[in-house]
Amino acid sequence: MEVRIISKEIVKPSSPEVYLRKPFSLSLLDQLTPAHYVPFVVFYNKPDNSRFNNTAQILAMLKESVRKALNQFYPLSGRTIDNCYISSYDKGVPYVEASVEAALADFIAQTEVELSKQLLPCQCFCSIPTSTSPQMVIQVTVFGCGGVAIALCGSHKINDATSASAFVKTWAAFNRGSDGGIRYPDMLDAGSRLFPPLESIPQDHLSLTEALYLTEGWHTSKTFLFQNDAIAALKLKAKSKTLEHPTRNVALSAFLWKHAMLASSAASGRWRPTVLSNSMNLRPRMKPSLPEHAIGNLRWFAVSTYNPSATDIELDQLAHLVSKASDISKDQISRLQSGDALEVMTELLSQMADFALQGDVEFFHCNSWLNTLGGDGVDFGWGQPMTSRPVWREARYYSYANNFFLKSAENGKAIEAVITLDAKAMEILEHDPGFLAFASPTSSLFSGAVSKI
């Protein structure tokens, strides 16, 4: 079941006007984000639209439409200069075409990690050179049955889940023959106008953010499914006098935090103070709100702390802490927009640094893709995807650690959590009856309803 590379090339915006555009400024939030690729793959059954009669036509149209999409999202075609701005839009996006003889359903059902990694055009979850690395790398793989997998690896230097999702939707619109032009193109650089870059970022700030994103150690990732009835039950368990209406995100992130703490404690033989950071999309929280296509890391973090001393960790207590952190972040976001971005960011980083200086503190991170890269609405002219998801499950030495990624599954009837932990802690989590009472481990690398084709 080998994936065979057909071609490798650089795709560039099709409009010559793009190359005359002025440099695109990074925001302060982009400057503080280490450059590394995060992968996402979306799978489609064999197109039955008469516009897509054969593999050659499918590949040709995808390539033509991605060039049109890059006209709209032109910074993705450039390179970062001095961690301050993006220019050289003629550098383009590396674009790989590949094929595999196997049927798509058989490929999705397999569990061989090394095989799944062949869908990705580059190495992910590791530090990359900021100045020479592309902002995005793409691979399109066609299966023997006619199915298609589209893998997008976006550099977190300029892509967060929301802006990457906006780019994919624009690409898909052009490919199906619709007008993919973005509304309010002048809002593309809203992030840098709200949070202007600094000429130089303090090295201790950069070192801290890189340490929080990328951690040394042997980690492994596994995927678990939470059905809607299980999520409803967790919301009831998370309810308390201080939190009468917990959201699904609060209840689920508190539940994951609890059981990750239990697993980590059992693996290490000791209790440690812990920190949970919940990523929040800033765009809908700005006044006025910003569009999805505003490029960059327009997100903030709600930070909760807990010092466990026994195995009896109450879910409603953790949910209260998560919700309280979200309330505190609302005030921080208001200050961000009022022009205090550097001060607020420095306070947040100082808070995280103070925790780290206490020694033996464990950091956990929760990222929600529920309203972004879930695959919904990404119709390239072949209908909705059969499944979509981030790709990582193998043990690795330098990567994301103690991470929870949440995304929609089963057409909104469930939530999929991709969990990355220390390998020993993961083994304990997989056999935790309290965890498995609500979570179902997936049997393959790729979840979702799969029909044999």
Image: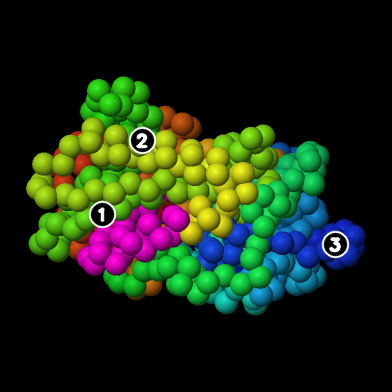
Q: From this viewpoint, is residue 134 visible? A: no
Q: Earlier in the sequence, mark 3 or mark 2?
A: 3
Who's the residue at 79% across and 46% down the image? 185
Q: Decide: is 184 above or below 188.
A: above
Name the residue rendered at 35%, 37% in the picture.
324
The residue identified by callout 3 is: 21
Residue corresponding to mark 1: 274
Residue nearest the viewer, comparing 219 with 50: 219
Helix, strand or loop under label 3: loop
Query: Dot 2: within a 10 Å radius of its alpha carbon, few (fewer than 14), some, or many (20 or more) residues?
Result: many
In the rendered structure, find residue 323 and report the number of the disc placed on it. 2
Residue 355 image position (x, y, % from top left):
30, 60
Residue 348 lies within the magenta run: yes
Can you give x and y, in whole percent of width and height, for residue 204 in the image?
Answer: 46, 72
Q: Which residues are magenta?
A: 347-368
Could you tell whether 254 is left or right of 1 in the image? left
Q: Position of residue 124 (x, y in %)?
A: 49, 67
Crowd around label 1: few <14 · some 14–19 · many ≥20 (10 Å)? some
As rendered, which of 204 and 317 lies closer to the eye? 204
**Quadrant housing residue 152:** bottom right
Q: Amino acid at mark 3?
A: Arg
Give me the residue at 57% from left, 70% from top. 201
Q: CA distance from mark 1 to mark 2?
A: 16 Å
- Residue 95 vs 279, above or below: the answer is below
Whole-percent x, y for residue 146 in the image: 60, 50
Pick the residue in front: 214 or 348. Answer: 348
Side of 18 where 83 appears, left or right: left
Q: Which comes before the other along the chain, label 1 or label 2? A: 1
- What amino acid type should be assigned to the residue bearing mark 1? Thr
User: Which comes sooner in the sequence, label 1 or label 3?
Assistant: 3
